[in-house]
Image (cartoon, coloured by chain):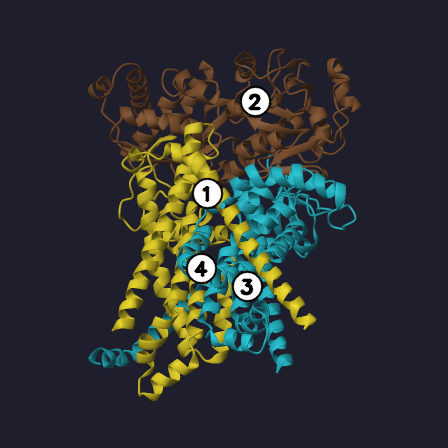
Chain colours: A cyan, B yellow, C brown
Amino acid sequence: MNNLTQRARMQPVLGVGTGIAAFASAAIVFLILIFLLVFAWPAIRFNGSGILTGVIWNIGNQYGSSTVTHNGVTAQAGASFGGLVFVFGTIATSALAMVIAVPLSFLVAVALVYRVPRKLQPLANTLVELMAGVPSVVYGLWGIVVLVPWVGNQLGPFAQAHLSWVPLVRGETGSGNGLLAAGIILALMVLPIMVATLRDVILAQPPTIFEASMALGSTTWQAVTRAVFPSVRKGFLAAVLVALGRALGETMAVLMVCGAAINQFPSNIFQAVNTIAAVIVSQLDSALTDASGMAQRSLAELALVLFLITLVVNVVARLTLRGADRSAQ
Amino acid sequence: MRHQRISRLASRAWWSVSVLALAGVLVVLFGIFWFVAVRGVPALRPALFTTVTSGVAGGLENAIAGTLLLVGAGLVLVTLVGIGTAIWIVEYAPPRAQDVSRFLIDVLAGVPSIVVGYFLYVVLVEGLGWGFSLVAGAFALTIVMLPYVVRSSDLALSGVPQALREGAFALGARRATVLFGVAIPWAIPGMLTGLLVATGIGLGETAPLIYTAGWSNFMPSLAPTHSPVGYLTYVVWTFISQPFPQAHALAYAAAALLMIFIFLTNLVSRSAVEYWSARSRRG
Amino acid sequence: MRKLALTALALALTAGCASQTTTTTATATAPEVSGRLLETGSTLLYPLMNLWVASYQKQHAGVQITTQGTGSGTGISQAIAGVAQIGASDAYMSDAQMKGTPMLNIPLAISAQQINYNVPGLNGVHLRLSGPVLAGIYSGKILTWNDPAIVGINPRYASKLPHHTIVPIHRSDGSGDTFIFSQYLSYSTPSWAQGPGMGTTISWPAVASGVGANGNPGMVETCKNTPYSIAYIGVSFLDQTQAAHLGYAALRNRAGAFVLPAHATIAAAAQAMVNKTPKDERISLVFAPGKQSYPIINYEYAIVNPHQTGAAARANLVAFLSWAILPNGGNASRFLDEVHFLPLPPSIVKLSKEQIAKIH
């Protein structure tokens, strides 16, 4: 009891302390945003809307002596910083990853909670969290040695032979490096976050929800999908958003399997794409050699675009959820 | 009647699908373990833990120590800041501030880790002149891990049944008492999951560390600044690009070690919590 | 100034001796250098740097050199920022960069590149390729292996060249390999020079079947797994490309002859460029004249700031660089052969020494 009163006395301290922590968290986001804005400012002026509408990415002739100036900002001659290919690739790979990972994580999580014997559950949980501990580079290496050849030499030819009537599958399937491989790798990488969170929120529900639904005559699966799932929907969405954030920003593994498309769009799910995060990592080194500095700043502008994409995704998800809540009432 | 039989069949079919999904994921996971083990185990020998990296050969003592140091420091910071943030969001924040904070945290999850690394490189390493250092690296990991810790702790604390809280308040308990006596113990598993997933992600990160912690072939000095630190993911990332088989073996050994670390962390923390909650239930 | 250069030379010589004799001689005859050095940059030079440092530190117990493989651009920019003392780079700094901060560009060794392909049935033979043909492939103008342009220079294999789409693989990350490959295309093909040009990263023309790969391991793996593909891969990965059973091409040089990458042809190309190397040593060795010259080779550079603070740190840096370029030091074949690099010709060693002497 003594201990408890002591804790009670801490209350204002606790409010202030956690408030500072929360302020620090928020401050980090703003600091990064301000940093990007300031750093990218010359590129914003140089590129105008081209960063979102242009298709050609060219840091310019580094060994020539001529430069181009636009809006008072100078870059090497021939420079063109069009980011549309990367914006498209970022959205496409993450969307594909979510199409795979959302249903998969739901299936895996309910299997973990309801079908794995209680004794084995700690082991199963550990395995799921271990999946989060596989370094991104290792996913990438596994991708180029195992997944990409499988997509390129098995799945691709199979799809060409039997699934050519499907719009996004038709056509040249190439080497296996591309949208599909990147989507699968990303799905695997975000899976542990989603499964672990969904499992925890299901377990945090009172078991009565499941039992009441069963008592009303539903099958076990109906009890899960119609009674338990609605009550954990918000938690699941939060997990999906964090996972989507990771997918949008994931770099190394995607870089290694996406085919690193430049100046072109894929015509089906097998062909090469590229993402903003992958481009930032793969181009940063060369950008550092740009004497005008514009390549480096344009990469910062791309980072800013990615920031905005994440922002929009989050706003849309929140509005959808709010709308759904209202219509449910 | 017939309708019922169909839905029962459907139920069974769906359960089979979900168990198959779980099995499929486990098969892929073991495939990746196998992939790493086959290539990395030949390099796992005792000298690995007692010698520093020297050229493409040598051991991983410096990288192991550096990884533990960086992730350890990052974890301390992220536990303080992350769980603090989650407590504030759930317990203290006005509704509007709750929404905004959650929103910002989700946005942070989408910032590529290379951007975090480069931001800190410009501000800390170059700007404040800290050089490649332990503190810069630990900050980078903290920022990368933060969203996972905040979101899972937030969810776990929000999931505490209202009845439990109200019961405690009805008994005259104060806010902090309810928080420490009721809410946090209830939320511990969820918070722990978040920390473990974050540890996994922190251990596996390369991009934000290259520009902040740098890399060192020598044992980390404990100096907070002006002294680069080695870490295992660097070995995975760069030694793979070396043209020598022994360098590749070292890279996969480093990857295997990272996975062993997360496995051990997981085992220890889960059993600690189990022990602890069993005791508190008895008490 | 002169005194410093002399000390450097003395240190270098003793270091060179030490590698041949024993460690004790070095410590007995010269003041031992000590302190920390940070090297960062080129991933192409990184393997060699690691071999060097491991051996060098055995002779100089007081020296701690940390090596980082981060990429040439990072190497240059961190050397300029003063975060690292040695920035390793596959590319010399451009005039525009030198205008910002003048740095020393010191060649340490010579590397080369082969053109690999995976054409079932033909990996055992050496196809002939030229700059214009490669430019055609990488810009989507030459689409199949039996294109007349390829058949024309490979009459022996005319019937074996398949009617299959070529998959051109390029590096997705910034790379010295892209730099010298695009130089070869630029110097040999005017339309390429006008278009994509040259650089550690370039704006690759859109080719539907084209694909990017990360790092040299990614190039080897993708080429191995993708039939009918073609790739440019650094010579340090020669053993890997052979283990993967990839073919490698004889390339047409400036004199019009088709030559294979080999010790003699790389050395011939280097020798042909010796007299053209300026005092600051910023020059491309690609597409060298001479019938024997292999067309894709380059200097690997150490980018160093000529102004170094602290006498001890300066001596440490100078001693290591001086050792690295010596024929019986870092340029000894026991180091270079491991990565299939070539030593600097004697007159280049002299130029590099003069540059090292400028560090003050």
User: Which chain does the residue under circle 3 lie in?
Assistant: A
Near mark 3 (Cα within 10 A), the count class, few <14, some 14-19 or many ≥20, is many
Callouts 2 and 4 in the same chain: no
Mark 4 secondary-structure assignment: loop
Residue B81 showing in the rendered view: yes
Residue C285 is labelled as 2
Near mark 1 (Cα within 10 A), the count class, few <14, some 14-19 or many ≥20, is some
Q: Nearer the viewer, mark 1 or mark 3?
A: 1
Mark 2 secondary-structure assignment: loop
| Quadrant of the rendering where the N terminus of chain C is positioned | top left
Mark 4 to mark 1 CA distance (whole Å):
24 Å
Q: Specify the quadrant of the image occupied by residue A176.
A: top right
Q: Nearer the viewer, mark 2 or mark 1?
A: 1
Near mark 2 (Cα within 10 A), the count class, few <14, some 14-19 or many ≥20, is many
Q: Specify the quadrant of the image occupied by residue B184.
A: bottom left
Residue A241 is labelled as 3
The residue singled out by tag 1 in the image is B33
Callouts 1 and 3 in the same chain: no
Q: Amino acid at mark 3?
A: Leu
The residue singled out by tag 4 in the image is A117
Location of residue A153 in the rendering, given as x and y in whole percent from the top left corner: 66, 36
Q: Are marks 4 and 1 in contact (CB under 8 Å)?
A: no
Furthest toward the front, the residue is B1
| Quadrant of the rendering where the C terminus of chain C is positioned | top left
Tell me: C17 left or right of C203.
left
Mark 2 to mark 3 CA distance (whole Å):
52 Å
Callouts 4 and 1 in the same chain: no
- The one nearer the camera, B162 or B237, is B162
